[in-house]
Amino acid sequence: IEEEEVIYRRPVAVMINNISVAQKVQTGLTQADIVYETEVEGGITRLMAVFKDVTKVQQIGSIRSARYPYVDLAMGHNAVYIHSGSDPTYCAPHLKDIDHVSVDNGICGAKRVPNGLSREHTVYAYGNTLWEGIKGAFKNTTVTDNTPFATFTAEGESLSLTGGAATSIDVPFPA
Protein backbone atom coordinates (compact mmCIF):
# COMPACT_ATOMS: atom_id res chain seq x y z
CA ILE A 1 0.00 0.00 0.00
CA GLU A 2 1.32 3.40 -0.92
CA GLU A 3 1.81 5.69 2.07
CA GLU A 4 0.02 8.49 0.17
CA GLU A 5 -3.11 6.32 -0.04
CA VAL A 6 -3.11 5.72 3.74
CA ILE A 7 -2.77 9.44 4.53
CA TYR A 8 -6.22 10.13 3.10
CA ARG A 9 -8.04 7.14 4.61
CA ARG A 10 -10.62 7.67 7.27
CA PRO A 11 -9.59 6.11 10.57
CA VAL A 12 -11.36 3.05 11.94
CA ALA A 13 -12.55 3.01 15.58
CA VAL A 14 -13.19 -0.44 17.08
CA MET A 15 -14.99 -1.26 20.34
CA ILE A 16 -12.92 -3.67 22.43
CA ASN A 17 -14.09 -5.72 25.39
CA ASN A 18 -12.34 -4.79 28.63
CA ILE A 19 -14.10 -6.83 31.31
CA SER A 20 -11.56 -8.77 33.38
CA VAL A 21 -12.28 -12.22 31.87
CA ALA A 22 -11.87 -10.83 28.34
CA GLN A 23 -8.57 -9.03 28.93
CA LYS A 24 -6.58 -12.23 28.34
CA VAL A 25 -8.04 -12.51 24.80
CA GLN A 26 -7.67 -8.86 23.74
CA THR A 27 -5.83 -8.51 20.44
CA GLY A 28 -4.73 -5.61 18.25
CA LEU A 29 -4.55 -2.94 20.96
CA THR A 30 -0.80 -2.48 20.73
CA GLN A 31 -1.16 -1.54 17.07
CA ALA A 32 -3.80 1.14 17.68
CA ASP A 33 -2.84 4.77 17.20
CA ILE A 34 -5.15 5.86 20.06
CA VAL A 35 -6.95 3.84 22.75
CA TYR A 36 -9.80 5.37 24.79
CA GLU A 37 -11.12 3.82 28.01
CA THR A 38 -14.46 5.03 29.37
CA GLU A 39 -16.96 3.64 31.85
CA VAL A 40 -20.01 2.16 30.13
CA GLU A 41 -22.23 1.04 33.01
CA GLY A 42 -22.06 -0.64 36.39
CA GLY A 43 -18.44 0.35 36.94
CA ILE A 44 -17.14 -1.57 33.91
CA THR A 45 -15.21 -0.02 31.06
CA ARG A 46 -14.77 -0.66 27.37
CA LEU A 47 -11.97 0.36 25.10
CA MET A 48 -12.14 2.00 21.71
CA ALA A 49 -9.06 1.48 19.56
CA VAL A 50 -8.54 3.96 16.72
CA PHE A 51 -6.45 2.82 13.74
CA LYS A 52 -5.23 5.04 10.90
CA ASP A 53 -4.39 1.94 8.85
CA VAL A 54 -6.43 -1.00 10.08
CA THR A 55 -5.06 -3.24 7.30
CA LYS A 56 -1.79 -3.57 9.25
CA VAL A 57 -3.59 -5.30 12.12
CA GLN A 58 -3.95 -9.04 11.75
CA GLN A 59 -6.68 -9.55 14.40
CA ILE A 60 -8.71 -7.11 16.53
CA GLY A 61 -10.94 -8.06 19.42
CA SER A 62 -12.83 -9.17 21.15
CA ILE A 63 -15.32 -6.71 19.69
CA ARG A 64 -18.19 -5.51 21.84
CA SER A 65 -21.36 -3.49 21.45
CA ALA A 66 -21.61 0.24 20.78
CA ARG A 67 -22.09 2.75 23.57
CA TYR A 68 -23.01 6.35 22.87
CA PRO A 69 -19.98 8.13 24.47
CA TYR A 70 -17.78 6.20 22.06
CA VAL A 71 -19.91 7.20 19.07
CA ASP A 72 -19.11 10.82 19.92
CA LEU A 73 -15.40 10.05 20.30
CA ALA A 74 -15.35 8.26 16.93
CA MET A 75 -17.20 11.17 15.29
CA GLY A 76 -14.46 13.51 16.52
CA HIS A 77 -12.00 11.53 14.41
CA ASN A 78 -14.34 11.20 11.39
CA ALA A 79 -13.81 7.47 11.91
CA VAL A 80 -15.84 4.52 10.69
CA TYR A 81 -17.16 3.03 13.96
CA ILE A 82 -16.93 -0.76 14.39
CA HIS A 83 -18.94 -2.64 17.02
CA SER A 84 -20.90 -5.85 17.57
CA GLY A 85 -24.48 -4.79 18.29
CA SER A 86 -25.63 -1.82 20.37
CA ASP A 87 -27.65 -0.72 23.34
CA PRO A 88 -31.13 -0.28 21.76
CA THR A 89 -32.33 2.50 24.06
CA TYR A 90 -29.51 5.03 24.24
CA CYS A 91 -26.96 4.15 21.57
CA ALA A 92 -28.85 2.73 18.59
CA PRO A 93 -30.59 6.04 17.73
CA HIS A 94 -27.24 7.85 18.00
CA LEU A 95 -25.64 5.53 15.42
CA LYS A 96 -27.62 7.21 12.62
CA ASP A 97 -25.13 10.11 12.89
CA ILE A 98 -22.05 8.06 11.98
CA ASP A 99 -20.84 5.52 9.42
CA HIS A 100 -20.72 2.27 11.38
CA VAL A 101 -20.52 -1.48 10.92
CA SER A 102 -21.92 -4.02 13.34
CA VAL A 103 -19.44 -6.85 13.02
CA ASP A 104 -20.66 -10.38 13.51
CA ASN A 105 -19.71 -13.81 12.30
CA GLY A 106 -19.41 -13.46 8.52
CA ILE A 107 -19.99 -9.68 8.42
CA CYS A 108 -16.43 -8.29 8.38
CA GLY A 109 -15.59 -10.54 11.31
CA ALA A 110 -15.51 -14.05 12.64
CA LYS A 111 -15.80 -15.92 15.87
CA ARG A 112 -12.51 -17.13 17.24
CA VAL A 113 -13.23 -20.44 18.88
CA PRO A 114 -12.56 -22.02 21.19
CA ASN A 115 -11.40 -19.46 23.72
CA GLY A 116 -13.38 -20.93 26.61
CA LEU A 117 -15.41 -17.76 27.18
CA SER A 118 -19.03 -16.71 26.68
CA ARG A 119 -20.29 -15.76 23.22
CA GLU A 120 -19.83 -12.02 23.76
CA HIS A 121 -16.08 -12.55 24.12
CA THR A 122 -15.61 -14.35 20.80
CA VAL A 123 -16.14 -11.81 17.98
CA TYR A 124 -13.00 -10.62 16.20
CA ALA A 125 -12.19 -8.71 13.03
CA TYR A 126 -9.24 -9.05 10.69
CA GLY A 127 -7.66 -5.85 9.38
CA ASN A 128 -7.70 -6.45 5.61
CA THR A 129 -11.14 -8.12 5.66
CA LEU A 130 -12.53 -5.31 7.79
CA TRP A 131 -11.18 -2.59 5.48
CA GLU A 132 -12.54 -4.36 2.38
CA GLY A 133 -15.97 -4.57 4.08
CA ILE A 134 -15.82 -0.88 4.96
CA LYS A 135 -14.94 0.05 1.38
CA GLY A 136 -17.87 -2.04 0.15
CA ALA A 137 -20.31 -0.46 2.61
CA PHE A 138 -19.39 3.22 2.35
CA LYS A 139 -18.54 5.52 -0.52
CA ASN A 140 -16.81 7.94 1.82
CA THR A 141 -13.65 6.10 2.94
CA THR A 142 -11.21 8.93 2.30
CA VAL A 143 -10.72 12.37 3.76
CA THR A 144 -10.80 14.92 0.98
CA ASP A 145 -10.62 18.08 3.06
CA ASN A 146 -7.76 18.37 5.55
CA THR A 147 -8.54 21.99 6.43
CA PRO A 148 -8.19 22.44 10.20
CA PHE A 149 -11.49 23.12 11.97
CA ALA A 150 -9.83 26.07 13.75
CA THR A 151 -6.80 28.25 13.15
CA PHE A 152 -4.58 29.37 15.97
CA THR A 153 -2.14 32.22 16.36
CA ALA A 154 1.36 31.18 15.34
CA GLU A 155 4.09 31.05 17.97
CA GLY A 156 5.55 34.51 18.50
CA GLU A 157 2.64 36.23 16.72
CA SER A 158 0.70 38.76 18.80
CA LEU A 159 -3.06 38.81 18.95
CA SER A 160 -5.38 41.67 19.87
CA LEU A 161 -8.84 40.83 21.13
CA THR A 162 -11.83 43.05 20.47
CA GLY A 163 -15.08 43.54 22.34
CA GLY A 164 -13.86 45.00 25.62
CA ALA A 165 -12.63 43.54 28.88
CA ALA A 166 -14.10 40.34 30.28
CA THR A 167 -15.37 41.09 33.77
CA SER A 168 -16.73 37.63 34.59
CA ILE A 169 -16.84 34.06 33.34
CA ASP A 170 -19.81 31.74 33.72
CA VAL A 171 -19.24 27.98 33.38
CA PRO A 172 -22.57 26.15 33.77
CA PHE A 173 -22.60 22.59 35.11
CA PRO A 174 -25.63 20.33 35.34
CA ALA A 175 -26.85 19.75 38.89
Image (cartoon, rainbow, N blue to C red):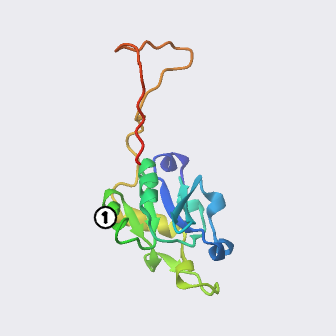
- Position of residue 34 measured from the top left corner of the image (x, y, whole percent): 58, 52
Q: Residue furthest front?
A: 175
Q: Residue at x 63, y 62 (%)?
A: 29
Q: Residue at x 66, y 59 (%)?
A: 30
Residue position for label 1: 93
Asked which quadrant contains residue 88, the reply is bottom left
The correct choice, above or below, for 130 with respect to 141 in the image is: below
Q: Nearer the viewer, residue 127 or 39?
A: 39
The residue under the point 45% across, 54% down is 74
> Residue lying furthest right in this view?
24
Q: Which quadrant of the structure image shows residue 68?
A: bottom left
Q: Position of residue 158 (x, y in %)?
A: 50, 12
Viewer-side residue, 154 vs 6 = 154
Answer with left or right where residue 79 lies relative to residue 126: left
Res 10 seen here: no
Classify mark 1: helix, strand or loop: helix
- The front one of 160 and 16 is 160
